[in-house]
Amino acid sequence: MQATPLALLLMLASAPATLLAQAAAQPSSAPASAPVADPAMAERVKQQYLHAWNSYKQNAWGHDELNPLSLKPHDWYGVSLHMTEIDGLDTMLVMGLQQQAQEAQDDLDRNLSFDQDIYVKNFEITIRCLGGLLSSYEITGDQRLLDLAEDLGNAEP
């Protein structure tokens, strides 16, 4: 039975445990690639990810998400928390998309602020923003990501 793109993406997503162990040992080194059962399928998944990412970057850069039918940006809370960039950063790192990951991280470093007086959905912010920042920090060891995660995690209600 051939793996579907979703199954392959799930296999790629399961790789961080190995990558995290390697990153903990050498946080400044780039993550090693996990073995892939079907390299051609992995490449197709990577190309589909890049298609979606490039569409987000062209049409909604700096916003929380892209509405796929209208190709219009959307911010969940009226101000951007850069959720797509945060949420996708660890995936880009696992897939070896270093240039895209660096562009996203540079934008987060320059433009992301959790110093907002807004009501947010705790679950979404926790899994997408806090989880995304922490997993990306674990892969890269980049203190700036941990600082953003701490800023968000220590925010007072």
Image: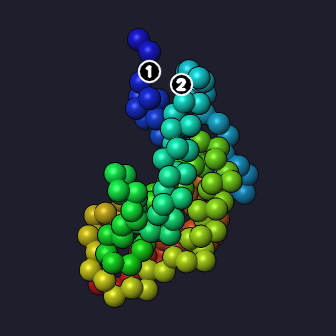
Three-letter code for the amino acid on which mark 1 is drawn: Ala
Q: Position of residue 109 (x, y in %)?
A: 60, 74
* Secondary structure type for disc 2: helix
Q: Check whether the beta carbons of the residues at disc 2 and disc 1 lie within 8 A of each other.
A: yes
> At 31% from the left edge and 75% from the top edge, which residue is drawn?
77
Q: Position of residue 148 (x, y in %)?
A: 52, 74
Residue 42 can be seen, yes or no: yes
> At 31% from the left edge and 63% from the top edge, which residue is drawn?
124
Q: Nearer the viewer, residue 126 or 62?
A: 62
3 to 98, vertically: above or below: above
**Residue that carries the numbered disc 2 in the rendered image:** 41
Distance between the alpha carbons at the discs numbered 2 and 1: 8 Å
The reply, left or right, for residue 59 in relation to residue 97 is left
> At 62% from the left edge and 56% from the top edge, which residue is drawn?
101
99 to 151, vertically: above or below: above
Question: Upstream in the sequence, badge 2 or badge 1?
Answer: 1
**Residue that carries the numbered disc 1 in the rendered image:** 3
> At 55% from the left edge and 51% from the top edge, which residue is drawn?
54
* Secondary structure type for disc 1: loop
The reply, left or right, for residue 103 in relation to residue 147 is right
Label 2 packing within 10 angstroms: few (<14), some (14-19), many (20+): some
Q: Position of residue 150 (x, y in %)?
A: 48, 75
